[in-house]
Image (cartoon, rainbow, N blue to C red):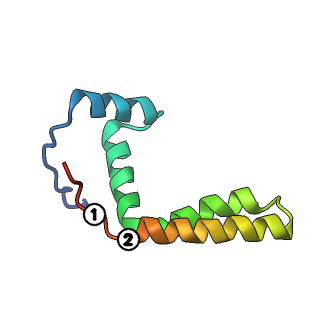
Amino acid sequence: MSRPPRPSFHVRLSPELKSRLEAVRGHKSLNREVNDRLERSFGEDLATRFGAIIAAYVAHLDAEDREKVLGLAGELATVLAKKPRKRVS
């Protein structure tokens, strides 16, 4: 039984963006790299990713330092989660 064809469309990338994607794709195709990045953008939210990163750094700290870092990280996450403001030119 054959699978239905996957939808496709043409995307224009700047030469700089294409070069950056090619530089980080490793052994994957450029198409796979773009698909993986798009899938990740819909997966985890900022707070989940941020929490995972911070957890790795605080694991080795003593309780007092861990509490300080997590407090600061919480404040940072709150600021980052706010709606972006329009830039004034």
Evaluate whether residue 44 shows in this view.
no
Q: Which residue is at the front of the view, 43 or 85?
A: 85
| Residue 81 in view (yes/no) | yes
Residue 54, position as x, y percentages in the image: 64, 61
Q: Mark 1 points at which residue?
A: 85
Q: Nearer the viewer, residue 57 or 42?
A: 57
Residue 63: mark: none
> What residue does disc 2 label?
82
Q: Which residue: 86% across, 64% down?
A: 62
The answer to the question of whether label 1 and label 2 lie on touching residues, with beta carbons closer than 8 A, is no
Q: Residue furthest right?
A: 62
What's the residue type where badge 2 is placed? Lys
Q: Amino acid under label 1?
A: Arg
Q: What element carries label 2?
A: loop
Query: How far, Cα to Cα, is label 1 from label 2?
Result: 9 Å
Left or right of 67 on screen, residue 80: left
Residue that appears at 77% across and 66% down: 66
Q: Position of residue 87 (x, y in %)?
A: 24, 54
Few, some or many C-alpha atoms within 10 Å of disc 2 (few <14, some 14-19, many ≥20)?
A: few
Q: Residue furthest front?
A: 89
How far across and how far down the image is residue 68, in percent? Answer: 73, 67
Element carrying mark 1:
loop
On screen, residue 49 above or below 15: below
Q: Is residue 64 left or right of residue 30?
A: right
Q: Which residue is drawn at 84% across and 70% down?
A: 63
Q: In the picture, residue 18 is in which quadrant?
A: top left
Quarter of the view holding residue 15: top left
Is residue 60 placed above or below 74 in the rendered structure? above
Quadrant containing the N terminus is bottom left
Residue 17 at x, y percent in the picture: 29, 34
Q: Which residue is drawn at 13% across and 48% down?
A: 9
